[in-house]
Amino acid sequence: MTRLDRAPSLSDVLRAGERSFSFEFFPPKTDAGEHQLWQTVRELEALHPTFVSVTYGAGGSTRDRTVRLTRAIRQDTTVVPVAHLTCVAASRDDLRSVVAEYADAGIADVLALRGDPPGGPGGEWVPHEEGLDHAVDLVALLKDLGNFTVGVAAFPEGHPEASGLDQDVAVLRAKQDAGADYAVTQFFFDAADYFRLRDRATAAGVRIPIIPGIMPVTNVRQIERFAQLSGAEFPEGLARRFHQVAHDPEAVRQLGISVATEMCQKLLAGDAPGLHFYTLNRSPATREIYSALGLQHRLPSGVTV
């Protein structure tokens, strides 16, 4: 089997209606963390993902590292990098400067997010006095600045600041109307939440693909903290199953892989347009889920045998 020099662009995959399989990383703060990340990138590159994405830290604190890492993935691997961009603590000129850096590095795919308040989730959102207030404004800016494929966030259980699920879907529709090409959801633990979001969005005229976000549970305390910060519900029955084996880290990991695999099977059987894995910069759990789903046998576009 030989691969082309580079995978097809994300926009090509979405236009073709193919399923998207992707992985998310965050910029590490230490040399050891960066070594771990690159090991994970190489291990997951072998699975031929549609794209990988690189987050901003809280309050946009890792902007420079995000740009550097995204550029390095673009230059040194065969995968398509999607760069995160947020409105947090940034003027319009700041945002234009970052977008120019991405464009100069040949990065044409951006995930446009408002971002959490500088004080963290649950804090009061105060936009930069010369910046943007909403993700929809960032989508419009990106589309004005170049031929970018733009992704946005979606929330199966509703955004914590939304007045209700109808408003939440109306915001997603507005992002689509501003030029968004696809959405990736916040992580969740019940496939029914994803399907309810998709049905509400379809009824509201949303036509862009909504890719479900998956975070395998490998550490109970960590996932409960993430769920609390994000506003996602960690269902009581599921939490009980994990707490029953919490004394055994390997049992927790195996249960997390089993639960995530079962949910992914339901999502794909229900015609979800792909899967986006929040990896926490480690690959074993994600690779095991990928294998259990039979996705390691998936030939990527651009491959000949």
Image (cartoon, grey):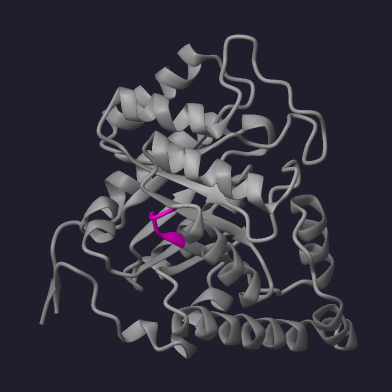
Residue 231 placement (x, y as % from top left): 77, 54
Rendered residue at 84%/67% (across/down) = 221
Above or below — where is 75 with respect to 206?
above
Residue 73 placement (x, y as % from top left): 36, 48
Q: Check the picture and name the quadrant holding the N terminus.
A: bottom left
Rendered residue at 31%/39% (across/down) = 107
Residue 175 placement (x, y as % from top left): 47, 39
Q: Check the picture and name the quadrant holding the C terminus.
A: bottom left
- Relative depth, front residue between 114 and 68: 114
Name the side, left or right, on which 45 lies relative to 175. left
Residue 184 placement (x, y as % from top left): 50, 55
Q: Is residue 209 magenta?
A: yes
Residue 48 picture quarter: bottom left
Q: Is residue 120 magenta?
A: no
Name the side, left or right, on which 128 lies relative to 79. right
Q: Magenta-highlighted stretch: main secondary structure? A: loop
Q: Magenta part of the protein: which range?
A: 206-210
Name the side, left or right, on which 236 lies relative to 85. right
- Relative depth, front residue between 162 and 110: 162
Visible residue check, residue 245 = yes
Rendered residue at 29%/30% (across/down) = 103
Name the side, left or right, on which 110 lies relative to 37. left
Above or below — where is 188 with respect to 155?
below
Q: How many marks?
A: 0
Visible residue check, residue 277 = no
- Relative depth, front residue between 4 and 146: 146
